[in-house]
Amino acid sequence: MEYEKVYVFQPESERPAKRRRVEPQGLQTSWRRRRQVFDRVWSGQQQAIDARLDGINASTVNKVWHFLERAVLDEQPGRIPTGIILTGADGATGPGIAKQVAERIRVGKHRRILLSLSSSSGTNLKALLKTLIVKATSRRTGSSDDEELDDEDDELRNPRSTGPKLLNYDLQLLQDHVREHRTEQVIITFEDTEAFDGDLLSEIIELLGCWQDRIPFACLFNIATSIDFLQQRLSKAAVKALAGQVFDVALSSVEVEQVCEAMFDTDTPLWLGSALMSTMLERQHDYVVSVDSFAAAMKYACMSHFYANALSVFLGLEAECHDIAADHVVAVRQLGSFKTYARRLLDDHQVAVLKEHLESDTALRLLVRDKVAKGRQKLSAMVQTLKVIRLVQQRLPHTPVSSMSSLYVQAMSGKLIGSPLIRALLLTIRKAPSNIVVTLLRDLMAFHTEKHTPTIPDCQLLLTRFEDLIESQKHSTKPLRSEDDSQNTTLRTTVVAQKVELSKQKSALSEQDKKYTELLGILTSGIEDIFASNLVNPTDLIFHEIFVYDLKSPYREVFTPRPRHAIERALATPHDYLDCDCCGSGQGDEHVEATLAATQPATAVLYQLYLESGSLINASDLWQAFQAVLGDGGEEAETMTLFQRALAELRYLGMMKSTRKRVDHVAKVMWQGL
């Protein structure tokens, strides 16, 4: 050990002989029920997410599976069947393909082995072969790619009764395992192909090609760049050893949209707010993490709401609302949306209704159950309206189609109501020709059959009038156009005071075009009414705090943590975490920097001395300064113990290290804020 002296902790008071049983009280009494509600809610969400993700690349998985099947039947000596999966710049879809292939192997009980290698599996050929053989021959599932394999103990017991001992990176071990278990194929997935060293990747491919006649290898490469770039990094012998086929997969952005649409289903009991959702999408775009990580972020957000918000118990079954504890009803009365609702009742002179809700817990429970159900229905109708917007954008030519996630973020923030996007969309509909409008109207009628979908009044009658009007135009092959169409507008040039002025002038419309313009106005008015009635601001709904979750801080602390900032803050200003008077800056001012004091923790004192030092710190000077801060009140042995423990903790945190330049000095490794 580097430090022999230790500090022995002796507690002043002994622990009780018997642990006390503390029963949950207040809002914590609903903890078990909230956990059950979360398990039930997320199980349904997870099934919807898995169903969408399994279907998005189903065709690609089928092609990869058929390719592997043909590779078993059509053997090519000396050449490895290789599937090249082009994942695109995000590179997050490839592992999902391998996971679905592994699931097929497991369900079908095929005699095949699928293992994955990453750039961290080994720094040289020897370590990479060790990892490959261990994963292929081990009966344990879920072995890590980062499993450490030492160079020592290279000899392994030969599974055969006779013969020489084999080294643990000898592929003869894998050949014996394949022969013993009658394995049809050994599939190797290279997860991050671009991160591999080019020479190392060439060496492993050439070696696998030499063993191809004894071990039926097959490879799957996840490529984020291009095939030409991969070919440039490999040697000629490695390229000749591969018999490849290219497969295209869906981009990670498409998978994210599928996860979002699964979360925005009409039966979703909990909705994520705009601030939280935009933060999650920004993180996914900036860091390009896998879609499984994005789904885990969704799960953590739901978990944070149900675990931390006691009022989420009202999202359970309607029959369970009557026996919710009275403390939860008292908490409901403290919600901001309920206070706004009470103020509205007073403005409407409904004092008796408000008095009943304030005095009767039963009446308030019924109000919560009713308003939460109606609020969820409004948000479901809003999501269906977003689908209507995307449907209209898809049917109108030269109109960009917005993603569902971006529309959801705008709608949940209340910015989509009367936005330029909606105004431009309605104007484009008014300019559309008759053939486009009739197709759009038919698609809207087919879409209106879904649950919670808003409908246009007299949609069938309106479609019939459009069809009759087009039927009367049989002699003309041109579609009907409205007066807002640019083709019905001409430019007029006039000269005034030697200046040329241009003005727009409407062309003369036929009777059919006038009737078409009138019908088109009815259609756009109906669509505009749908947008106005269903695009609501969630914060205007009563009890939105129960079924909408929009807190960013728990999410950021878990998925984008700043541990170094937290450690530096705790050591520089321990009062922020300890909340004690002895460690404070004094005078009750939070903006004044904390000064050195003997009452502060020893590690915090040494860290502040560490900040005042240079790149090389004299250990003797540091000890004298530390002893001067703590004072002469304590024994020197105890002060030395605190100093050595604080020094060891700073070294454990990676802030300093020993140096060979000067034996009696320590080197400073980190600087604050860098």
Image: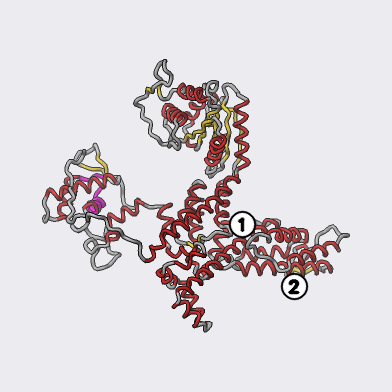
State the SS at label 2: strand
State the SS at label 1: loop
Q: Which of marks 1 and 2 is nearer the N terminus?
A: 1
**Front residue of this view, candidates 531 and 498:** 531
Q: Residue at x 50, y 75 (%)?
A: 341
- Name above or below for residue 349 compared with residue 173: below
**Front residue of this view, candidates 234 and 636:** 636
Q: From this viewpoint, is residue 612 visible?
A: no
Horizontal placement of 411 versus 561: left or right? right
Amino acid type at mark 1: Ser
Residue 645 image offset from top left, x and y in percent: 21, 47
Q: Does the magenta stretch include residue 608?
A: yes
Horizontal placement of 454 versus 350: left or right? right
Amino acid type at mark 2: Val
Q: Say whether marks 1 and 2 touch (CB < 8 Å).
A: no
Residue position for label 2: 496
Figure quadrant of residue 260:
bottom right
Residue 255 image offset from top left, x and y in percent: 56, 48
Q: Residue at x 44, y 59 (%)?
A: 34
**How many other residues sit within 10 Å of disc 1, few (<14), some (14-19) or many (≥20)?**
some
Residue position for label 1: 402
Q: Residue at x 21, y 62 (%)?
A: 582
Horizontal placement of 458 versus 670: left or right? right
